[in-house]
Amino acid sequence: MKLLTYDSGSGPRCGVLIDDQMVDLTALPGADQTLPDVRALLELGDSPIDRVVDALARTIAPPLLFFPQ
């Protein structure tokens, strides 16, 4: 799992790369805001990495995938 910032064509977003699939973190359960970058995620507080790992574990099929070209 790698955290990164990407641009899907509508501006920067925070995502996570798992194998070769990009998951937009805004699409995960419990996300209440669009995160423009990894720094915004880390500034959330309350163990943001643990929150991402927990959300990924609860998500069987990630709802919004972006495949880098």
Image: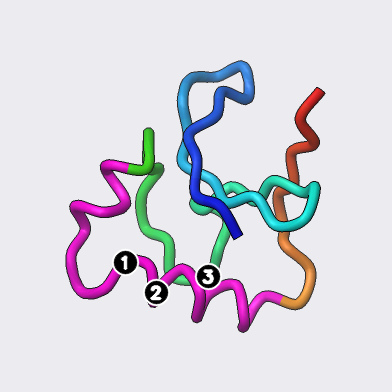
* Magenta-colored stretch includes residue 53: yes
Q: Secondary structure at mark 1?
A: helix
Residue 51 — which label? 2
Label 3 close to label 2 by CB (< 8 Å): no
Q: Pointer 3: what residue?
A: 29
Q: Which image quadrant for residue 10? A: top right
Mark drawn on residue 48: 1
Marks 1/3 in contact by CB < 8 Å: the verdict is: no
x, y percent for residue 19: 77, 55
Q: Nearer the viewer, mark 3 or mark 2?
A: 2
Q: Residues within 10 Å of mark 1 (few under 14, many from 20)?
A: some
Q: Are marks 1 and 2 in contact (CB under 8 Å)?
A: yes
| Position of residue 4 in the picture relative to residue 43 (left or right) | right
Horizontal arrangement in the rendering, residue 51 relative to residue 29 (left or right): left
- The mark nearer the N terminus, 3 or 2, is 3
User: Amino acid under label 3?
Assistant: Pro
Q: Amino acid at mark 1?
A: Pro
Q: Main secondary structure of the magenta part?
A: helix
Q: What kind of colouring is applied to the model shown? A: rainbow
Give the percent coordinates (x, y) of residue 38. 37, 43
Q: Report the front residue among 44 and 49.
A: 49
If the image is split into quadrants, where does the C terminus sit?
top right
Could you tell me which residue is drawn at 48 percent across and 20 percent down?
11
- SS state under label 2: helix
Near mark 2 (Cα within 10 A), the count class, few <14, some 14-19 or many ≥20, is some
- Residue 37 lies, with reference to residue 32, above or below; the image says above
Q: Which residues are magenta?
A: 39-59
Q: Residues within 10 Å of mark 3 (few under 14, many from 20)?
A: some
Mark closer to the observer (1, 3):
1
Q: Residue at x 74, y 38 (%)?
A: 66
Q: Decide: is 60 above or below 1.
A: below
Q: CA distance from mark 1 to mark 2?
A: 5 Å
